[in-house]
Image: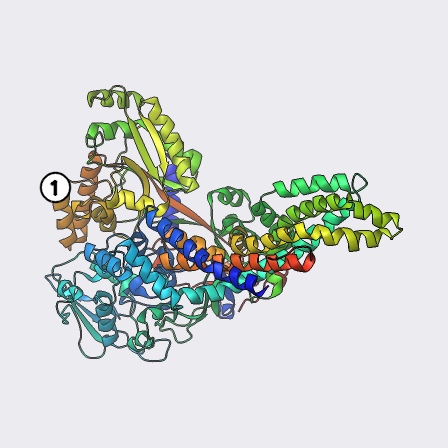
Amino acid sequence: MRARAVAMLLCLAAMGCRPSGAVPVPAPDRYGGVFRGAWNRNPVTLDPAYVVTILDATACALIYNGLVRFDERGRVVPDLAVALPEVSPDGRTYVFELRRGVTFSNGRELVADDVVYSFRRVLDPATASRRAWVLEALEGAEAFSRGATGELPGVRAEGSHRVVITLVAPQAHFLSLLAMPAAYVLAREEVERHDDPRDYGFHPVGTGPWILDTWIPGSRLYFRANRDYFEGRPYLDALEFRIIEDPATALAEFRAGNLHLLRLGPAEYGAFLADPRWRDCLVACPDLAVYYLGFNCEKRPFNDPRVRRAINHAIDRIAILEAVLPGRYILANGSVPPGLAGHDAGLEGYAYDPDLARRLLAEAGYPRGFRMEILQTPSPGSLQLTEPIQRMLAAVGIRARLVQLETSAFFATIGDGGNPDSFLVSWWADYPEAENFLYPMFHSRNRGAGGNRARFADPEVDRLLDLARYTLDAGKREALYREVERRVFAQTPWVPLYFPVNYLVHQPWVGGYVPCPVPNAQKMTGVWLGPQPRSHEARETTQR
Amino acid sequence: MTRYLSRRLFLMVPLLLGVSLITFILLYLVPGDPVHSLVGERASPETIENIRRELGLDLPVHVRYSRWLGRTLRGDLGRSWVTHRPVRESLVTRFPVTLRLSVLAFTFSSVLGVSLGIVVAVREDRGIDHPAHRLLIAGQSVPVIYLCLLFMYVFGVWMGVAPISGLGDGSLRHFLLPAGALGLYTAVPKARMTRSAMLEVLRQDYVRTARAKGLPEGAVIWRHALRNAMVTVVTVLGSGLSNLLVGSVLTETVFGLPGIGKLQIDAVWARDFPVVMGCFIFQALVLSLCNFVVDLAYAWVNPRIRLE
């Protein structure tokens, strides 16, 4: 419990509830410098219509803007719009006034038609966007994305700086969807300049604070500051992100002073935490994600809630997490992470009680246990969790076999392509809403690959989720999501494990870095570099 | 000779066809769905169906193979399913990185390995031989990844004499550490092979004759022994270079070098079919060309070998 409280505090600190003034305000002479970071893989594309991964979203956030965006606490704030939109009483019409004088990095001024073009492009079947669902609530989107009509009444420009969006039905989290990369605004002429429109993803042009200068696949990306950025130019002159896959290499580069920011792996975290020189440079960053051991609720014996409860009681989650991820987790008793409206801190997990587990198994007709498989990806972290789970299950008579599948095969099996017993998996949010956890993972409409891998089905949960999605009153919506969460976890479709807390460490001369739980909230505009010690300067290599 | 050369070149055609067919079938058989990594969760069934059609995944396997083959024969390797970059462009930009790393590592390891092998063979059972032999065995037992990290920390972080990782501006100094680590690692088998080949030759009658007629020891070793020992050594050197060209993925990953190896591994994970096929075909071509050159080198170092 103490670990939980500490983790909660860290989480709150990172979510922005730190004392004001903790982040020093840079003086005017702090302009300039090149920030050097590392990404563990190459971005796939910088075309918002095809962004699926967290890394691509992070990179696109530097280049583009949407009508609205997330701030570092995950709240929706105006971006290209002057203010949050006026919403009609029926919750179906949103009117956005655009900022004036915003220019794309090609010099052209942004107008309302650009928003219309960008939205139509995502829904256009010819684009084959992977994220068409983000805008599926727009009026006429369904027929338009099928190619049945060329009309999309759901988004239209009124004059040069007003955009009117109409939805088929009210959607409570619609503004969060508009802050996703798929709803970023592009310049039509830049997309159409390429013979193959997919080449645009390598030559992106947006209105954002950074302009992509160089991209050497597998090696590095170099962004220079947009000096005409509508919120004022960033402090830094440029950002360089090198692609460093191996964590040991990234650590070596950081220790030599060649990287300004490092995401710490479990092995390094302890060493940095224990070292007083780095203590002030460690930043906690809770991810909007949940790790769980899911059951296939359609398959015997896991279709019996008593069996699922028995397994919950058989596993000492705190002992495992304290051993594997000390200081890097928040114990999960449900699916919605703390910090989101709808998170239920009062939700009690199933206490570790192997005797009760045995009794429940006997009651369900399995006094001598049974055999089961736990599917997982080949990541070393997975085995660290499932091996102790295997031993604890053996203590109540369940003989679990750990099956490692290559990532692509794993997701195909737990999606629609297989019939697993149970699986260790995580869910990462696209936007900071309880809806983004509960709807995909527990609505029967999303069974299998849609996100409901546990094949959980409860008509009442479906009804409540549908109701919540259309409930515009934030308080009522939150209450509905809490009710859903309680109802779901009373039926134990999972063993919820933890909400991950990650740690970043920055060099002492880096200021203004605030971690963002939502990946595309990070615009890097407030980061600055102070004077750097000589020893490091000598070693820095100019890599343009 | 010309007949031999043209026959060897002609035989590459069925070889490449075989490699492409086997790779294609293996990719078809391994479990996992490429579409999943492309669309993420929450994509509608229509989106998934559209993408399957767009990629041709709805077609029977023989139709897919013949389409791929037809396009490839016209010189079009297609575009990556994941990044949409043309495969040929990726190979063209990444191969020079792998080539530079391999050639540097190869040169370093050949010079070091062969000279070390000669020295320890000449001094058999004396002075340097035993400690050097033990060192060679130890060297072969150290995993290359460990050697990479060792180089990185010693020369990069502590001494600061070379860039730790990355391609930087592409200059030679960015290849010093990876080529050094890889070169040292691959020098060991070369040294051991050179040593045993030299020992065998040094026991031959013609070496004794050379010594008996009063030739200086240097001339015996350089003119009579080494030339003959090189036949075995060239085989090892040749396969060494081709192994480096297709198998330095660990070094590339650790040192963050965007070479072919990394491209290929990423593509395999993502089931990025056109890239995997392109990489394998390209590597098969490189390997067979390397072997071809090695065969030619035999004739050069040892005229006794008849190519026919």
Q: Is residue B301 above or below residue A460?
A: below
Tell me where residue B180 sits by quadrant: bottom right
Kind of residue indicated by mark 1: Glu
Relative to the observer, which residue lies in front, B75 or B165? B75
Residue drawn 16% across the image and 52% down it: A469
Q: Nearer the viewer, residue B254 or B136?
A: B136
How busy is the neighbourhood of tag 1: few (under 14 within 10 Å), some, or many (20 plus)? few
| Residue A22 at least partly seen | no
Element marked by disc 1 = helix
- Left or right: residue A45 compared with residue A454: right
Q: Which residue is tagged 1?
A: A460
Label 1 resides on the chain identified as A
Color encoding of the figure: rainbow
Q: Is residue B193 left or right of residue A416?
A: right
Q: Residue at x 52, y 50 (%)?
A: B250
Q: Is residue B293 left or right of residue A349?
A: right
Q: Residue A420 placed where, x, y %?
A: 27, 37
Q: Nearer the viewer, residue A431 or A120?
A: A120
Q: Is the residue A483 above or below the residue B75 in the image?
A: above
Q: Position of residue A44 (x, y in %)?
A: 38, 60
User: Residue at position x 47%, y 68% from top?
Assistant: A238
